Image (cartoon, rainbow, N blue to C red):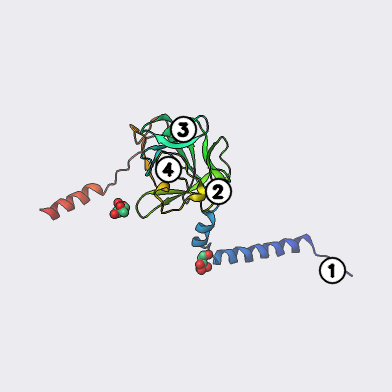
Amino acid sequence: MRHIPSPLSYLILHLFAFCYYAQVTNQSPPNFTQHVSEQSQVTDRVSRRLIRTYQLYSRTSGKHVQVLPSKKINAMADDGDVHAKLIVETDTFGSRVRIKGAETGFYICMNKKGKLVGKKNGQGRDCIFSEIMLENNYTALRNARYENWYMAFTRRGRPRKGSRTRQHQREVHFMKRLPKGAQPAQPAHHRSFDFLHYPFSRRTKRTHYSADQ
Ligand SMILES: *[C@@H]1O[C@H](CO)[C@@H](O)[C@H](O)[C@H]1NC(C)=O
Ligand SMILES: *[C@@H]1O[C@H](CO)[C@@H](O)[C@H](O)[C@H]1NC(C)=O
């Protein structure tokens, strides 16, 4: 007589395996450090996408990066120029971003020769840059596909080939600036913040006052 496992014994076995699995996973919480370093390398599909608007002021040209309708990128724009307004979308919860011209909608990308080009579709890694805050407080933008290449402009505002760039060069240094006349809160896009009034604030204040006196 052969022993045929009944569906019930399968069920019990499954249940047992599941409990065991749950217990094991429960005992080993995810490694946060590892999670952060892994997730910083890939597109973040879980968090809300953060979108900022700013201008990039080039340290060498003294002007702003602009994306022209011809898909050309340069750093020759004045403060407040319509083509200098950039929309910056986060790609990871780290500091990787996609940058596009607000006026033209073209993304700033880097081709395989290290040339900065405007592209309609910004999904590729060639259109992703890591925002790096340097010790001198300037920002550098390193390409995600060509990992040693940075966004850079000459004194005359012409794009510099990525293959010739290094992080310490002035050509790769930028300041992020709000567009001229931009209000920190744009009513069309954002709701203003709701402030929470802490019940403690008054008492804290009073304590502070009495301490002063
Ligand atoms: C977590 O991951 C980091 C980097 O991968 C590693 O150095 C560290 O030892 C790990 N920590 C634990 C508790 O596994
Ligand atoms: C960078 O900014 C910080 C904070 O504002 C400041 O303390 C520091 O001196 C700045 N560094 C340089 C090189 O300007």
User: Which residue: 42% across, 34% down?
Assistant: 85
* Residue nearest the observer in this picture, 66 or 43: 66
Residue 188 x %, y %: 41, 29
Q: Nearer the viewer, mark 2 or mark 1?
A: 2
User: Which residue: 54% across, 57% down?
Assistant: 38
Q: Which residue is mark 1?
A: 3
As helix, strand or loop, the secondary structure at mark 3 comes to loop
Amino acid at pointer 2: Thr
Cα separation between marks 1 and 3 = 71 Å
What is the number of the mark on residue 102? 3
Q: Nearer the viewer, mark 4 or mark 2?
A: 4
Cα separation between marks 1 and 4 = 81 Å
As helix, strand or loop, the secondary structure at mark 1 comes to loop
* Residue nearest the observer in this picture, 135 or 46: 135
What is the number of the mark on residue 43? 2
Q: Earlier in the sequence, mark 1 or mark 4?
A: 1
Q: Which residue is mark 4?
A: 154
Q: Is residue 92 visible?
A: no
Q: Earlier in the sequence, mark 1 or mark 3?
A: 1
How packed mark 4 is, by other alpha carbons closer than 10 Å (few <14, some 14-19, many 20 or more), is some
Residue 175 x %, y %: 37, 44
